[in-house]
Image (tube, rainbow, N blue to C red):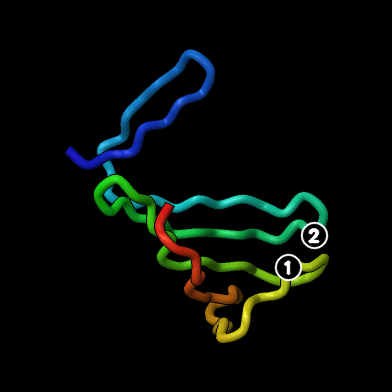
């Protein structure tokens, strides 16, 4: 069964998902970041990322496309 295991302290749970999105706001620039991840066997694969602005060393990478107010790009990291 494919899924994602999450652990926090004594809490351990398994989510029956094949993909998920992580989202957060940069603490200094107050800019939203989002990442789309998928589960591929025993690995996590980062498919796409988006940021809604730039600043403080957070410039969109080369090849990013501005669409709907966010910079969209495909990170070049391998599976983890």
Residue 35 placement, left or right of 57: left
42 sits to left or right of 58:
left
Counting from the top left corner in percent of width and height, residue 73 is at 52, 75
Image quadrant for the N terminus? top left
For the point 73% across and 68% down, which residue is it?
A: 58
Q: Residue at x 51, y 23 (%)?
A: 8
Figure check: 67 above or below 39: below
Image quarter of residue 37:
bottom left
Residue position marked by numbered label 1 in the rendering? 58
Q: Residue furthest top?
A: 10
Q: Which mark is residue 70?
A: none
Please give the label number shown on residue 29.
2
Q: Which secondary structure, mark 2?
A: loop
Residue 25 drawn at (x, y percent)? 67, 52
Would you say the residues marked 2 and 1 are in contact, meaning their CB atoms lie under 8 Å apart?
Answer: yes
- Label tally: 2
């Amino acid at each position: 069964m494919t899924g994602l295991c999450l652990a926090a302290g004594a809490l351990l749970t398994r989510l029956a998902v094949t993909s998920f999105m992580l989202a957060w706001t940069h603490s200094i620039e107050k800019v939203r970041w989002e990442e789309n991840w998928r589960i591929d066997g025993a690995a996590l694969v980062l498919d796409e990322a988006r940021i809604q602005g730039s600043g403080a060393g957070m410039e969109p990478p080369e090849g990013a496309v501005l669409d709907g107010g966010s910079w969209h790009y495909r990170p070049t990291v391998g599976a983890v």
